[in-house]
Image (cartoon, rainbow, N blue to C red):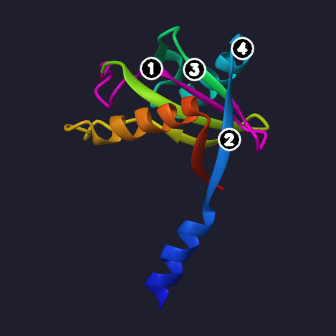
Amino acid sequence: LIAASIVLTGCINNVPITTKPIKSDAVFSEAKRLAADKMRDPEATKFKPEYKAFETNKGDTIVCGTLNGKNAMGGYVGYKPFYIRIRNGVAQAFNLPGEDDDYGYQAKTIIQKCDDASAGSMKVMN
């Protein structure tokens, strides 16, 4: 019963939204600041200038891009895709493949989220 309620709770929180593309350097700047704050060394985080940004029907902003951050040893790990959903200046969701993503499963999930946003419809955790 407990497991069933956990599963059902997860389904209830998975909300369908619609998205439309926007182009805003201010939105990208905010996304870079919020994403860098999640990194081990925020000041050293590098971003590629290409990004996709979307406005949702729920008032959130979604930004997809590519960043490079440092690991615990202080070395850069290489550019990886990221996804961030922002509401009222706060990161509601931030996804970046971990260092253990040897087979690219996490990266594929992030890319799929961005593809769904590009298609105009996706599901997000509330």
Amino acid type indicated by mark 2: Thr
- Crowd band around label 4 with a 10 angstrom C-alpha radius: few (<14), some (14–19), many (20+): few
- Crowd band around label 3 with a 10 angstrom C-alpha radius: few (<14), some (14–19), many (20+): some
**Image coords of residue 81 (percent x, y):** 42, 26
Q: Nearer the viewer, mark 3 or mark 1?
A: 3
Q: Residue farthest to the left?
A: 102
Q: Nearer the viewer, mark 1 or mark 4?
A: 4
Q: Which mark is residue 115?
A: none
Label whose residue precedes the other's in the sequence (1 or 4) = 4
Q: Is residue 70 above or below residue 46?
A: below
User: Helix or strand or loop: what does disc 1 sit on?
Assistant: strand
Label whose residue precedes the other's in the sequence (4 or 3) = 4
**Which residue corresponds to mark 2?**
18
Q: Residue at point 71% right, 14% down?
A: 24
**Which residue corresponds to mark 1?**
67
Label whose residue precedes the other's in the sequence (3 or 1) = 3
User: Helix or strand or loop: what does disc 4 sit on?
Assistant: loop
Segment tinted magenta in the rendering: 55-77
- 114 left or right of 19? left
Label whose residue precedes the other's in the sequence (2 or 3) = 2
**Which residue corresponds to mark 4?**
24
**Which residue corresponds to mark 3?**
52
Residue 51 sits in quarter: top right
Amino acid type indicated by mark 4: Ser
Amino acid type indicated by mark 1: Leu
- 15 left or right of 112? right
CA distance for labels 2 and 4: 19 Å
**Image coords of residue 60 (percent x, y):** 73, 38
CA distance for labels 3 and 1: 13 Å
Q: Is residue 20 above or below residue 109?
A: above
